[in-house]
Amino acid sequence: MLTRYRVLAYVTGVLLVLLTLGMIAKYVLHLDGAVDFTRVVSIAHGWLYVIYLVFAFDLGSKAKWPVGKQLWVLLAGTVPTAAFFVERRITRELEGKFAQNEAPAAAKA
């Protein structure tokens, strides 16, 4: 569950950075080919962001996050580079919880 969230967070983050660069190339630099590039990347990002939302929501509901934290994680895929920082923080937090939950189970065995 955490792995699929992490993969989609990275993919969404990379596509959003590429989309931002494509928009700069299209509207600021007026580069040839930027229109097609941004079209392809925006479609890919849009569809994969929907999957990211599903995975992030599933992870947050199982981790029992409050609504504010859940929204923060869900919106991270809309701000360039935010997904990388949010993913890292969430991974550290959940890996710590998983380690705490496994320690008592190992002691009982």
Image (spheres, helix red, strand yellow):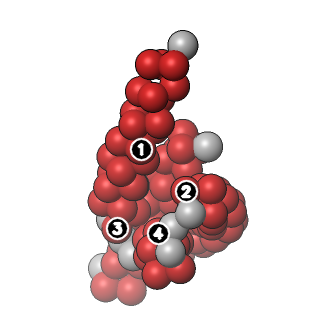
Separation of disc 1 and disc 3 at Cα? 23 Å
Badge nearest the viewer, 4 or 2: 2
Separation of disc 4 and disc 2 at Cα? 12 Å
Q: Residues within 10 Å of mark 1 (few under 14, many from 20)?
A: few
Check disc 1 and give the amino acid type: Lys
Q: Quadrant of the C terminus?
A: top right
Check disc 2 and give the amino acid type: Ala
Contact between labelled residues 3 and 4, with CB atoms less than 8 Å apart: no
Q: Residue 108's spot in the image, x, y percent?
A: 51, 19
Residue 63: which numbered mark, if any? 2
Badge nearest the viewer, 3 or 2: 2
Question: What is the residue that sits farthest to the front in this orientation?
Answer: 108
Contact between labelled residues 2 and 1, with CB atoms less than 8 Å apart: yes
Residue 97: which numbered mark, if any? 1
Separation of disc 3 and disc 2 at Cα? 20 Å
Sequence-wise first label, 4 or 3: 4
Q: Residues within 10 Å of mark 2 (few under 14, many from 20)?
A: few
In the displayed structure image, the side of residue 14 where residue 85 appears, left or right: left
Identify whether 30 is placed above or below 89.
Answer: below
Check disc 4 and give the amino acid type: Val
Q: Which residue is mark 4?
A: 73
Separation of disc 1 and disc 2 at Cα? 9 Å
Q: Quadrant of the N terminus?
A: top right
Mark 4 secondary-structure assignment = helix
Which residue is depicted at the point 39% across and 86% down? Answer: 27
Mark 3 secondary-structure assignment = helix
Residue 82: which numbered mark, if any? 3
Q: Residues within 10 Å of mark 4 (few under 14, many from 20)?
A: many
